[in-house]
Amino acid sequence: MAVAVSLLVFLLGTSGCMTRSAANAKAQAAFAAGQQAVTRQQTAPPCAFRGDVKNPSVPWAEELTLAKALMAAEYTGLWDHTQL
């Protein structure tokens, strides 16, 4: 019985148990970090395009590449690939 109790105490001590106040502090820190990430995304300048496109302004995102931005702008002009 004493072995089982000491094993239980060991497992509880190493399993990451925390007080309610520590859990609340951790949750608040995670919430604040998420709010900061959203704020950074909202203040990022958009990518602007000129020319024959449906969407001259494409919102910037972390994973946005030039190819994705061009596809999002939706080029509407006629292009003859033989006229290079």
Image (tube, rainbow, N blue to C red):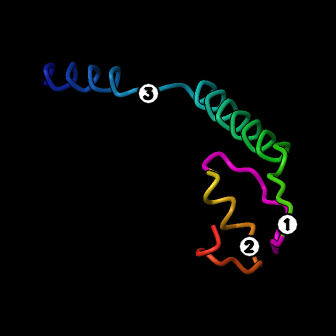
Place of residue 18 in the rendered image (x, y in percent of width and height, measured from the top left): 50, 25
- Under tag 2, what secondary structure? loop
**Mark 3 or mark 1: whose residue is earlier in sequence:** 3
- Please state the extent of the stretch shown in magenta in the rendering: 52-63
Residue 19 is drawn in which quadrant? top right
The label on residue 75 is 2
- Along the line of sight, which residue is nearer the eye, 5 or 65? 65
Near-viewer residue (79 or 8): 79
Give the amino acid type for the residue marked by disc 1 in the picture: Gly
Q: Is residue 69 above or below residue 20?
A: below
Residue 12 position in % (x across, y down): 33, 26
Residue drawn at point x = 60 percent, y = 74 percent: 81
Magenta stretch: includes residue 19: no
> What is the spatial separation of the Cα atoms under label 3 and label 2, in whole angstroms?
55 Å
Please tell me which residue is depicted at 21% across the width and 19% down the height of the picture: 6
Query: Mark 3 = which residue?
Result: 17
Give 5 or 60, whichever is nearer the viewer: 60
Find numbered disc 1 in the image and state the secondary structure of the residue it sits on.
Answer: loop
Quadrant in the picture for the C terminus:
bottom right
Coordinates of residue 10 in the picture (x, y in percent): 26, 20
- SS at circle 3: loop
Q: Is residue 39 above or below residue 78?
A: above
Query: Is residue 60 one of those drawn in magenta?
Result: yes
Left or right of 23 in this view: 29:
right
Q: At which x and y percent is residue 48?
A: 84, 55
Q: Are marks 1 and 2 in contact (CB under 8 Å)?
A: yes
Residue at mark 1: 51
Instruction: Report the quarter where the N terminus lies.
Output: top left
